[in-house]
Image: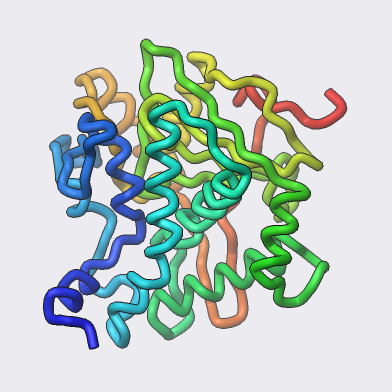
Amino acid sequence: MPSGRQQLKAKTQHYLPCVYLKQFSADGLNATRKSKVWRLDPTICVEVPVDSQCSDNYFYTKADSALAEEQFHELEQQYGLIARKIRQGQTRTPEEDYRLILMMFDIHLRNRMYTNQTGNENFEAYKIRWSAFRSEILLPGAVSNPTDAEVLDHLKNSWRVQLLQVNEQFELATSDNPSLWFSIDNSSSLHFVVLPITPACCAVAFDVRCIRVHENKLSCRDTFNLNRHQICHSQGALYSSKKPTPEEKEMIIGEWHKREKPGGSTTDKKWTVNLLRWRGRDHLSFLVEPGH
């Protein structure tokens, strides 16, 4: 039986983990869940504690509030260690790269942009998305219910992750919906995922059969486009380590007014995935299709 303190802790359930968002605090390596980040939304621009963001009371489940925390704990803990390695410029192991890719998938699948139409708690909708992702998107037609081992084998055979550094003059922002999934065509196939890791770098996970990354740095245009994606595909909040300038605020709010808000839904029978379409090298220059 959880203690009263554990129950209180499990009441606040984050759909974007604190271990992710704290990487965008100016505290850097010393950041904690109490560190502050700059939040910009259509009405305010203010510094906020990381743990006050991207959560709701019992967002996943009230029936067993400790369950959600236990579900996400191991992967989040591993991500914290990987993010520290990235900040310190240390070499990652292949196993850590696979965990990073899994976290990039998981952050997307946890997001509240997906409307829950299952009639059950959000934790059940999340499990439906994970199951559908594994069998319908990651390993379509392979097996009806892939095991963890089969998923890992597929990642080892077909997926890689590459870090890209920004120019020192610029920074990456993130949002309340930061893991962006892309297709290179009009299908429902997932070909690559982009996730800002810190203000200084992002990760690109990609299916090597369909796309490849040929750079380890972002051009100025790439950085602008990735930040724009974070604006356009956020639920309603952008986060950064520095206070946005008045000009940046005006541009960001203008993008919000023009955009079509991201969506998707989960029923007990179907998951409608939110996929973006890659527009080619003029859009993200670090990517090329095999054979080019």
Is residue 45 shown left or right of residue 233?
left
Q: Quadrant of residue 152?
A: bottom right
Q: Image point 82% across, 31% down: which residue?
A: 290
Residue 290 against residue 16 in the figure, above or below = above
Please tell me which residue lies in front, 69 or 190: 69
Quarter of the figure with the N terminus? bottom left
Colour pattern = rainbow
Q: Quadrant of residue 123?
A: bottom left
Q: Image point 39% across, 28% down: which residue?
A: 88
| Residue 171 percent across, percent down from the top left | 36, 22
Q: How many marks?
A: 0
Residue 124 against residue 18 in the figure, above or below = below
Residue 199 against residue 99 in the figure, above or below = above
| Residue 68 percent across, percent down from the top left | 36, 73
Please tell me which residue lies in front, 155 or 242: 155
Residue farthest to the top, as pictured? 169
**Residue 276 appearing in the image:** no
Please tell me which residue lies in front, 123 or 71: 71
Quarter of the figure with the C terminus? top right
| Residue 211 percent across, percent down from the top left | 74, 35
| Residue 228 percent across, percent down from the top left | 44, 30
Residue 176 against residue 116 in the figure, above or below = above
Please tell me which residue lies in front, 170 or 22: 22
Q: Image point 74% across, 56% down: which residue?
A: 154
**Residue 173 appearing in the image:** yes
Q: Quadrant of residue 153?
A: bottom right
Q: Image point 17% across, 42% down: which residue?
A: 35
Is residue 40 shown left or right of residue 151?
left
